[in-house]
Image (cartoon, helix red, strand yellow):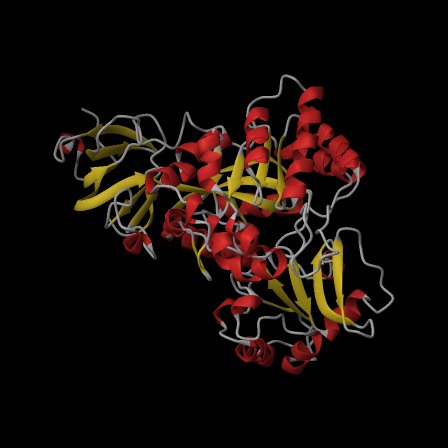
Amino acid sequence: MSKADLLIRAGAIHTLVPGQPPQRALAVRGDRIAAVSPDRNGLDAWASGDTVVIDRPDATVLPAFDDTHTHLMIAANSAHDVPVHTARDLPELLGLIRERAQRTPPGQWIRTTANWQEINLPERRFPTARELDSATDAHPVLVMRGGHNIVVNSAALELAGITAETPVPAGGHIGRDTDGTPNGWLQDNAIPLVARLLPEPSLAQRIDGFRTATQDYAAKGIGTVRDAMVPVSDLPVLRAALEADALRVRVRVMASALGFTTVDAVDDLLDRLEEWRYLPGPWLRVWGVKFGLDGGIEAGATREPYACDHGFHGYLTWEPKVLTEAMDRVLRRGWRIGTHAYGDRAVEQLLDVYAELQARHPGLPAGALVMEHGGLADAELRARAVELGIPVTIQQPLLHDIARIEDTYWGPERVNRLFPARGWIDAGALVTGGSDYPVGAYGAMASVWGMVTRETVTGVRGPEHAITAAEAIALHTTNAVALLGESDTRGLLTPGRLADLTLWDVDPTVATPDRLHGLNPTHTVLGGRVVHGRP
């Protein structure tokens, strides 16, 4: 009998094969599952003196989870930035920047983490450029918040040449005081005005950032991430991180076309992407191209006006006909497309564009066109997406974090309808789960708990859209690998598939919501290697 490199004995091993009862032993050879057994000691003969054994009689084993829409690149790049997400109010946030400035040479950039929400602070607002100046006027400062907003100080505004006369880029926003003076807030397509000035960190620093960030993803039960915003210029860094054994999760890249508005820009992206079409091994792959059709929390394109401004409906970042032509180029080059569509007007417009693309390309493979978020999608829009065969990625942790601020912009009724998991599943959609970190917190059970309870920072929102734990787990496992086209190699714990799995102290499939909250795995195993926890 073959010997195992890893042997797991547990109370319940959920293979996720329909109808198969829990197993109790699992053997791994190399990076693949070799055997499973319903008998806890049924695979003992596979063990040798060199076999790593995880013997947890009360543990539950599940496949490792996929986060199908997150921003690992942001997590890695900010691994050593000022941790303003720990601040409880604006004075503490400014104090953290001030402390970093005291040990940073004058003139060097200071940047912060992005996973925080100003509306969840007592002041319920961004810091201003002048307030950031009070922390330091000797350094340009960039405060990140999610992927759609930054706030900078006066030194950064001056370096970028942003003044009262600076025109607002299409699909962007420049915050201003009443006299027109920029107040430091930049949104969406205005962000590159400053972001282009940031100095490049060293390759060693970036690799260390990936090591730190991916280790934390793994510690929260995530085995594969689909990064929804990767510049092509960063692909060599990802490959270097892989070669340095610094990746603790598998990475599926969405090459970023965010901020683009022309077909020529997309053509240039595709030319540069070509050399990355075939990457060896199962750790790093380019999934396709990411577009953005509307704004984020503050600027998602809606049918009805905003609650805070009855003359505002958000904005679209592409002219639809131009977007169709740009996406046509992507499909003709054989890549898949994922598109950010958050508000219902954007969802409707995206389905129109996708329908036109399907008419032009009747032989498109399943999953070639994906909707990212579909946040405000009513029953009619959901039905149309299913009819067109468009999968959707939803992010319950995003709703958890942004409920209060979205109440301000869209009003409570629309917030209650965000990310309707129950409706998508019942309509027959291929729907998957993600975090949208840095706005939502990444983590397997952070997402499962949220989808089961619909809890947010403002309490339970839209409980009719809640789903079961088993359904939520499927969104991150079997559904996720179907979206990625990897069902033949991952997602089930069966012989021949990659040994990507997680161990838990409680059984998430039957645990009460209070047990799911804050729950993390004791072990995460990827390709038969224990990347989190001790054997």
Say which of 3 and 360 sits in front. 360
Q: Quadrant of the N terminus?
A: top left
Picture coordinates of residue 442, whole percent (x, y): 45, 52
Find residue 134 and report its horizontal and vertical position in percent.
66, 82
Q: 149 left or right of 425?
A: right
Q: Quadrant of residue 249?
A: top left
Reply above or below: 459 against 101: above
Q: Is 24 situated left or right of 237 in this image?
A: left
Residue 50 in sight from this viewpoint: no
Q: Say which quarter of the image contains residue 517.
A: bottom left
The image position of residue 378, as x and y in percent, is 56, 39
| Nearer-the-camera pick, 220 or 35 | 220
Q: Quadrant of residue 468?
A: top left
Residue farthest toward the top in the current orientation of the protein: 363
Query: Taking 416 as reference, is 144 above or below it?
Result: below
Foreground residue among 119 and 44: 119
Q: From where the camera sits, is residue 418 visible?
A: yes
Numbered marks: total: 0
Q: Is residue 289 left or right of residue 529?
A: right
Q: Position of residue 511 (x, y in %)?
A: 26, 48
Query: Would you say 136 lies left or right of 31 here?
Result: right
Q: Is 301 rendered above or below residue 197?
A: above
Q: Residue furthest right?
A: 165
Name the residue: 81% across, 66% down: 162
Residue visible at 58% across and 58% down? 406
